[in-house]
């Protein structure tokens, strides 16, 4: 069965404390992996797309990486404004899109 | 330019009533998706429209749910005979083509009393 699992479910960090969020997937024929950020009361906002193992993308304090089985969203020296829910989504060969349940990230000042 | 617009932003209804949720996608986007997000849960795929192709309805949870997309633009999600378990945030997203970045609206929060 195709699945996308994100861990941890929630993460509390001190400002400046770097960490990583995980998205592991078991899907048939990956066509792309997407990371989104969702703030309370809003729809998800696009961050990154990764298409092949070994690919990396960076934006400000965030870096996304991809292997054949999982993706990591690394956050370096986070700030309180990075607090949000981070969602991972996988497109697979049937054009289905599967979202993980997300990681709720809280950065303490 | 304008993003994806959803209306209403909030809807409170009584059990058994029908509701219609509207989505105005970004102009020119051929793909349109509906999702449901329950408290603390991820996004549950409901239905997908791509151009003039037949929609993918595989995510609709029951025959009380239906959706249409008129003129390749505006979409309406209809829930008939609402139940309390239908309470959730309903999100719409559009993208310029399939397998591309999705742009989401702010959602409609549906509460069934």
Image (cartoon, rainbow, N blue to C red):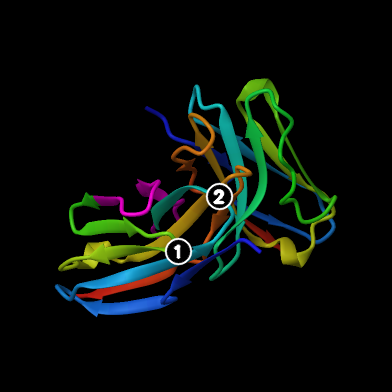
Residue drawn where x is 37% and y is 46% of the image: A49
Q: Position of residue B15 (x, y in %)?
A: 81, 61
Residue B28 placement (x, y as % from top left):
50, 22
Q: Which image quadrant for residue A23?
A: bottom left
Residue B9 against residue A11 in the figure, above or below: above
Residue labelled with disc 1: A69
Q: Is residue B91 magenta?
A: no
Q: Measured from the top left, where is residue A80 in percent x and y?
A: 22, 68
Query: Which residue in the protein does label 2 denote?
Result: A29
Q: How far is disc 1 from disc 2 in space, using C-alphas?
A: 12 Å
Task: Assess whether residue A47 is covered by the magenta stretch.
Answer: yes
Q: As displayed, is residue B30 above or below residue A106?
A: above
Q: At x 38% / y 60%, what residue is drawn?
A: A67
Rate crowding at label 2 as few (under 14), some (14 to 19) or many (20 or more) other CA atoms within 10 Å: few
Q: Is any part of residue A37 visible from this angle?
A: yes
**SS at mark 1?**
loop
Residues rendered magenta in the picture: A38-57
Q: B7 or A27, which is in the foreground?
A: A27
Horizontal side of B71 relative to A102 (left or right) equals: right
Instruction: Judge left or right: residue B83 versus residue A33.
Output: right
In this orientation, does residue A40 appear? no
Left/right placement of residue B28 relative to residue A61 reads right
């Amino acid at each position: 069965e195709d699945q996308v699992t994100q861990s941890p479910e929630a993460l509390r960090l001190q400002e400046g404390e770097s960490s990583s969020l995980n998205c592991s997937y078991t899907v048939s024929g990956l066509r792309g992996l997407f990371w989104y950020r969702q703030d309370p009361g809003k729809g998800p906002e696009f961050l990154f797309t990764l298409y092949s193992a070994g690919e990396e993308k960076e934006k400000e304090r965030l870096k996304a990486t991809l292997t054949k089985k999982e993706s990591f969203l690394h956050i370096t020296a986070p700030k309180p404004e990075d607090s949000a829910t981070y969602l991972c989504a996988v497109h697979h060969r049937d054009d289905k899109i599967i979202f993980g349940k997300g990681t709720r990230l809280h950065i303490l000042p | 330019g304008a993003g994806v617009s959803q209306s209403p932003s909030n809807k409170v209804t009584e059990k058994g009533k029908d509701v219609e949720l509207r989505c105005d996608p970004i102009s020119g986007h051929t793909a349109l998706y509906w999702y449901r997000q329950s408290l603390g849960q991820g996004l549950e795929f409901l239905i997908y429209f791509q151009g003039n192709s037949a929609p993918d309805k595989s995510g609709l949870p029951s025959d009380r749910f239906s959706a249409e997309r008129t003129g390749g633009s505006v979409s309406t999600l209809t829930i008939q005979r609402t139940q309390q378990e239908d309470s959730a945030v309903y999100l719409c997203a559009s993208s310029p083509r399939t397998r591309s970045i999705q742009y989401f609206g702010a959602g409609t929060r549906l509460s069934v009393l």
